[in-house]
Image: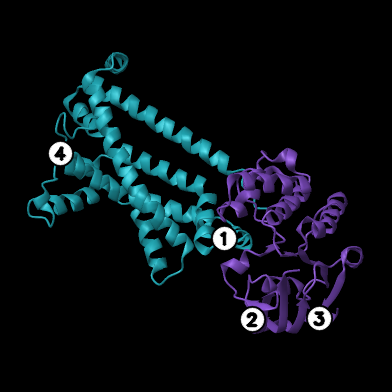
C-alpha cells in the first residue's frame, strides 16, 4: 500500500515538473493517435455517409463487416499490419515497420470501422423528412445529402470521439508494429506496460493518470455532444 | 401568375389501393386554391405529385410559363415549394432555417439577410430569429415552415394541412398569413384541408376531393 502511495506521489511530481521523457511520450501518443484519427475520419465519415445515404448492392454486407470490425482485436490488427510491413511483406520495401507510421497505420485500421459504423448509424437516424424538406426548398440531391450529414453531426462527432478513445487506449497493435523503441515509438500505453514489468511504477502511474485524464476529457466531450444532440425532436 | 400547372388524368396506387383516379385540374391564376376532403380522399398525394415530390402511375403533370412548357428539372423545382405536414426543422437557429433555401441558391449575403428578415417579420418570428428552431411551439414551427418556404419566393406554394394539430389561436394566425400571402409576391397558393369552414374562409377556388376523385371545382 505504501509503495503504491509513494508511486502516486512520485508520479504527481513527474507531472508537475513536466518531465521531458514523460512529455515526449505524451506528445508521440497524441501525434500517433491524432494522425490515425484524422486519416480514419477522412475515410470513415464519407464511407459511413455513403452507406447511410445510398442504397446499392452489397451495402448490407459492408455494414455487417463494418459493425463486426468495430470489435477487431488489436493484436490481430497488429499481426496483420506486421505481415504487411515486414521485410517479406507486400509493402516491406517501404521499411515502415517499427516506425510511428506503422503505428498510425495499425490504429487507423482499428479506428476506421468505428467511425464508419457510428457515422452510418448517425446518418440513418436522421428523420427522412429532412431530405424531403430540403428537396421542397430546392436542394439538389447532393445538397440534400449534405444537409442530412449536417443534421447527423452530433452523432458523427460522437463516433470520432469514440474512435479517439479507442486509439488512445490501444496497446496490442502498436506494440507489435511499433516495437516500443525508447524515444522513437514508445507511447503512453506501451510505456505503462513496460515500466510495470520493470517494477518502475512512478512513470507508469504518471502516464496512467494522464491517460485517465485524457479519457475523462474525451468522455466529458462525448457527454456534452450527446446532450447537445438530444434537443433534437423532429417537427 | 407566371407559372401555370396543368394536371391531366393522374392516377396513383399504393399497393392495391387506388389513391388517385384520373384526376385533372388546371391551376392558371394567382390566388388561393383549397383542396378539401376527408382523410384518405387523396388530397395530400395529389399535392405531393403536383409539387413533383412523387411521380404518378399514369397521367401528366405539366408546367407552363407564358404559354411555353417548362422542363421538370431543378430550376423548376426552385420555382415551386411544398410545406409538408411535418415541417422537418433543421437542428439550428430559426434564422439559419429560413436562409437555407437562399444559401443553396448562392444569393448575395445582403439579399439573403433582407429577404430572411422580411419573411420572419411576415410570420411574426423576427424576435425569435436567434432561438433554436427545435424549441419553438407547434404553431411557431408551422410559421417557421411558411417563412422558410416564402423566403424563396415560390411562384406556386403548396401547403399540406398547414393548420393540422395546432391550437385555435395559431390556426387563426396561419390563416391570416395565408390570406396575406397573395400580396407577398403574388404567389399561387394551393393548400389542403379537411375543415370545410376553413376552406370557405380561405378559398378563391374550392376543389372538393373524395375517394381519389376530384368532385367539384
* Residue under the image location 39 percent in, 27 percent down: A213
Callout 4 environment at 10 Å: few (<14), some (14 to 19), or many (20+)? some
Q: Are marks 2 and 4 on the same chain?
A: no
* Element class at badge 3: strand
Label 2 with label 1: CB-CB less than 8 Å: no
> What is the chain letter for disc 2?
B
* Element class at badge 4: loop
Q: Is residue A219 left or right of residue B113?
A: left
* Element class at badge 1: loop
Q: Nearer the viewer, mark 3 or mark 2?
A: 3
Q: Which of B63 and A131 is in front in this view?
A: B63
Which residue was labeled with disc 1? A139
Label 3 with label 1: CB-CB less than 8 Å: no
Which residue was labeled with disc 4? A179
Which residue was labeled with disc 3? B214
> What is the chain letter for disc 4?
A
Amino acid at each position: 500500500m505504501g509503495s503504491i502511495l509513494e508511486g502516486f506521489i512520485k508520479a504527481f511530481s513527474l507531472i508537475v515538473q513536466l518531465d521531458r521523457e514523460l512529455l515526449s511520450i505524451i506528445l508521440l501518443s497524441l501525434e500517433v493517435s491524432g494522425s490515425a484519427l484524422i486519416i480514419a475520419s477522412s475515410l470513415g465519415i464519407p464511407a459511413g455517409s455513403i452507406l447511410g445515404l445510398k442504397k446499392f448492392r452489397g451495402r448490407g454486407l459492408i455494414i455487417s463487416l463494418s459493425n463486426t470490425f468495430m470489435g477487431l482485436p488489436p493484436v490481430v490488427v497488429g499481426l496483420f499490419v506486421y505481415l504487411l510491413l515486414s521485410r517479406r511483406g507486400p509493402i516491406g520495401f517501404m521499411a515502415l515497420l517499427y516506425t510511428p507510421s506503422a503505428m498510425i497505420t495499425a490504429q487507423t485500421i482499428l479506428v476506421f470501422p468505428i467511425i464508419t459504423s457510428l457515422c452510418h448509424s448517425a446518418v440513418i437516424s436522421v428523420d427522412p423528412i429532412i431530405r424531403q424538406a430540403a428537396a421542397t426548398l430546392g436542394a439538389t440531391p447532393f445538397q440534400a445529402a449534405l444537409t442530412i450529414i449536417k443534421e447527423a453531426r452530433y452523432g458523427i462527432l460522437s463516433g470520432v470521439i469514440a474512435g479517439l478513445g479507442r486509439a488512445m487506449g490501444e496497446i496490442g497493435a502498436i506494440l507489435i508494429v511499433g516495437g516500443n523503441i525508447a524515444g522513437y515509438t514508445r507511447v503512453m500505453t506501451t510505456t505503462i506496460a513496460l515500466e510495470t514489468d520493470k517494477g518502475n511504477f512512478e512513470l507508469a502511474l504518471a502516464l496512467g493518470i494522464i491517460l485517465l485524464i485524457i479519457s475523462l476529457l474525451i468522455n466529458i466531450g462525448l457527454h456534452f455532444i450527446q446532450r447537445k444532440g438530444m434537443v433534437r425532436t423532429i417537427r | 401568375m407566371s407559372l401555370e400547372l396543368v394536371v391531366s388524368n393522374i392516377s396513383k396506387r399504393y399497393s392495391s389501393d387506388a389513391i388517385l383516379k384520373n384526376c385533372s385540374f388546371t391551376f392558371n391564376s394567382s390566388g388561393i386554391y383549397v383542396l378539401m376532403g376527408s382523410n384518405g380522399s387523396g388530397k395530400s398525394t395529389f399535392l405531393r405529385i403536383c409539387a413533383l415530390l412523387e411521380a404518378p402511375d399514369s397521367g401528366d403533370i405539366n408546367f407552363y410559363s407564358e404559354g411555353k412548357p417548362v422542363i421538370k428539372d431543378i430550376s423548376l423545382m426552385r420555382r415551386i415549394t411544398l410545406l409538408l405536414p411535418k415541417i422537418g426543422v433543421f437542428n439550428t437557429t430559426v434564422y439559419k432555417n429560413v436562409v437555407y433555401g437562399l444559401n443553396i441558391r448562392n444569393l448575395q449575403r445582403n439579399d439573403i439577410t433582407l429577404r430572411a428578415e422580411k419573411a420572419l417579420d411576415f410570420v411574426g418570428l423576427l424576435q425569435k430569429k436567434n432561438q433554436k428552431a427545435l424549441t419553438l411551439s407547434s404553431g411557431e414551427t408551422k410559421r417557421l415552415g411558411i417563412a422558410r418556404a416564402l423566403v424563396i419566393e415560390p411562384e406556386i406554394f403548396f401547403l399540406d394541412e398547414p393548420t393540422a394539430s395546432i391550437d385555435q389561436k395559431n390556426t387563426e394566425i396561419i390563416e391570416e398569413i395565408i390570406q396575406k400571402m397573395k400580396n407577398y409576391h403574388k404567389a399561387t397558393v394551393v393548400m389542403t384541408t379537411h375543415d370545410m369552414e376553413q376552406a370557405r374562409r380561405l378559398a378563391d377556388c374550392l376543389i372538393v376531393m373524395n375517394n381519389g376523385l376530384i368532385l367539384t371545382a
